[in-house]
Image (cartoon, rainbow, N blue to C red):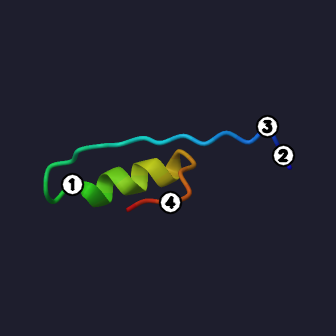
Amino acid sequence: MDDSKKCELIIVVVKKGFSEKVIKAAQSAGAKGST
């Protein structure tokens, strides 16, 4: 088992219509998933 692996959770509240920009920025920064 790899004990060096870390998990992080970032929660963002976004005004309706702006979520695509936030998701693109997060993915550009290395995020691997979004909901």
Local secondary structure at mark 3? loop
Instruction: Tell me the mark number nearer the camera, choosing from 1 and 3.
Output: 3
Q: Residue 21 at x, y = what percent?
A: 31, 54
Q: Nearer the viewer, residue 32 or 29?
A: 32
Marks 1 and 3, how far apart at CA: 34 Å
User: Is label 2 in a helix, a strand or a loop?
Assistant: loop
Q: Which residue does the numbered mark 3 point to in the structure image?
A: 4
Along the horizontal axis of the image, is 21 left or right of 34? Answer: left
Q: Are marks 1 and 3 in contact (CB under 8 Å)?
A: no
Marks 2 and 3 sit apart, C-alpha to C-alpha, by 6 Å
Report crowding for label 2: few under 14, some 14 to 19, many 20 or more residues within 10 A (C-alpha): few
* Relative horizontal placement of residue 24, taking residue 18 as reference (left or right): right
Kindly identify which residue carries mark 2: 2
Compared to 28, does 33 lie above or below?
A: below
Q: Split into 4 quadrants, where in the image is the C terminus?
A: bottom left
Earlier residue among tags 2 and 4: 2
Amino acid type of the residue that numbered disc 2 sits on in the rendered structure: Asp
> Callout 1: helix, strand or loop?
loop
Q: Position of residue 34 (x, y in %)?
A: 43, 59
Q: Nearer the viewer, mark 1 or mark 4?
A: 4
Front disc: 4 or 3: 3
Residue type for callout 3: Ser
From the image, tell me which residue sits under label 4: 33
Hey, what amino acid is under mark 1? Phe
Pointer 3 local density, CA inside 10 Å: few below 14, some 14–19, many at least 20: few
Q: Position of residue 2 (x, y in %)?
A: 84, 46
Q: CA distance from mark 4 to mark 3?
A: 20 Å
Q: Which mark is residue 18?
A: 1
Distance Cα–Cα, label 2 vs label 4: 21 Å
Cα–Cα gap, marks 1 and 4: 17 Å
For image coordinates 53% across by 45% down, the residue present is 29
Amino acid beneath label 4: Gly
